[in-house]
Image (cartoon, helix red, strand yellow):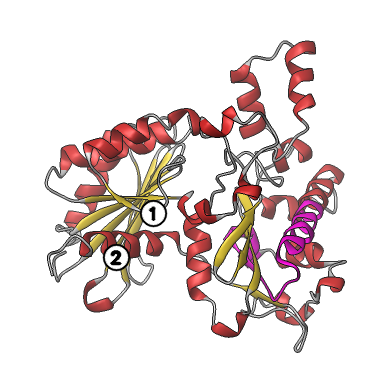
Amino acid sequence: MDSACNVLCLNHGSSSLKFALYDMQRGDELRVAEGAAEGIGLPTRRFWLRGSKGETLIDRSVESGTLEAAVAAMSQALGEHGFRRFSAVGHRVLHGGPDYMSPQKVTPQLILALSRCVPFAPLHLPGQLEVIRTITTHYPDLPQVACFDTAFHRRIPEVAQRFSMPRFLWDEGIRRYGFHGLSFEFIVASLPPEAGSRMIIAHLGNGASMAAVLNGVPADTTMGLTPTGGMMMGTRSGDLDPGVLLYLMRQKHYDAAVLERMVDTESGLLGVSGLSSDMRTLLESSGTHPHAAQAVEMFSYQARKCIGALSAVLGGLDTLVFTGGIGEHASFVRSEICKGLKHLGIELNDERNSRHESIISVSGSPCTVRVIRTNEDLMIARHTRNVLESERPP
């Protein structure tokens, strides 16, 4: 890569294109700009850009809501503020299928292979592949790297990856993949040696999952084939008895599209509360809205149960890490999750927890409970730099 290494990190969601620009030269990891085009495909659209100190450079509504327009707006805005040259683009790609265990340089062959993985992630992969193609159109000579959210979990033992279903489905790639891998990678890299060998990382946000990590290697995770599985989330159901879906198909005559919409966008905190998928709103309303209180209680209960199950996988627990929007900011939820886990050595210091300190457990407790802000964009920037540096001749 160039000595002046500016990596543009892209994260395409269902209706947004988030981006961050990192200066990675000479080992520095400086975020110089970040922004997003929000409301892609929706009536209300917004574009914003912030500088290296968080100062707002642009915040405006935009007329066109296409992905092409979002990329053009990003390029124009970065250019207007002096960010005209990139060394590479790194993409967060949700699913790498059964074959990709590490970040990959984008090639026509890779795009073809990922196109075959679309059935595993039909809500995310088509848009993320479109972003890669759009960047290729705008910057045909710019190297791109795909960073897979599933890659971190590919070392999970087969006994934990397999579903108890006919063996031919494994050969078709049906297995537990796990997600939030870039976040988990960042947390593992951030922990000091004294964190111990047995840790659980709880990435709790609108999407929520946990990973059990033993000696730095993933041992199990809560999400499965798709990001819908696992624990209750903002709008996603999490794990269900398959009989629930069969009942809805037979008795309600729901087809795959209706079921997909229900379990992905109408369930979770939103479905239970009937009010909101946002944990802040539910916590503010829980005193007067019993369904909001129940949604918070269910979320905390399911998270607590996941910690218990993953600690059994590890044979005990040295460190529990909370990260993600809820994990980093909702002290009440952290407290509710940790109630009843004293047998695992988990005991919170209420004052530390309320102040969102980096360590929120009681001093000297067998399990250290930490709060760490995750940074998936920086992980993408690191992977992109490393992939392209590995291609340089010695």
Of residues 239 and 80, the one drawn nearer to the viewer in this rendering: 239
Residue at 19% from the left image edge and 48% from the top image edge: 76
Q: Position of residue 91 (x, y in %)?
A: 34, 49
Residue 228 location in percent, x, y?
62, 38
Q: Which mark is residue 7?
A: none
Q: Give whichever of discs 1 and 2 has the lower sequence position.
A: 2
Q: Please tell me whether mark 1 sits on a helix, a strand or a loop.
A: loop
From where the camera sits, is residue 50 visible? no
- Mark 2, residue position: 22
Image quarter of the C terminus: bottom left
Between residue 323 and residue 57, name the one nearer to us.
Answer: 323
Check disc 1 and report the residue beneath it.
102
Q: Residues within 10 Å of mark 1 (few under 14, many from 20)?
A: some
Q: Is residue 325 magenta?
A: yes
What main secondary structure does the magenta stretch of the protein show?
helix
* Marks 1, 2: nearer the viewer: 1
| Dot 1 amino acid type | Ser
Depth check: give the residue in front, 48 or 118: 118
Quarter where residue 39 is shown: top left
> Going by the picture, which residue comes out furthest to the front?
167
**Residue 91 in the image: above or below residue 121:** below
- Do the CB atoms of the residues marked 1 and 2 lie less than 8 Å apart? no
- Front residue of 118/21: it is 118
Start-end of magenta stretch: 300-329
Query: Residue at the location (44% across, 60% down)?
Result: 376
- Label count reads 2
Residue in the picture at 48% in, 72% down: 189
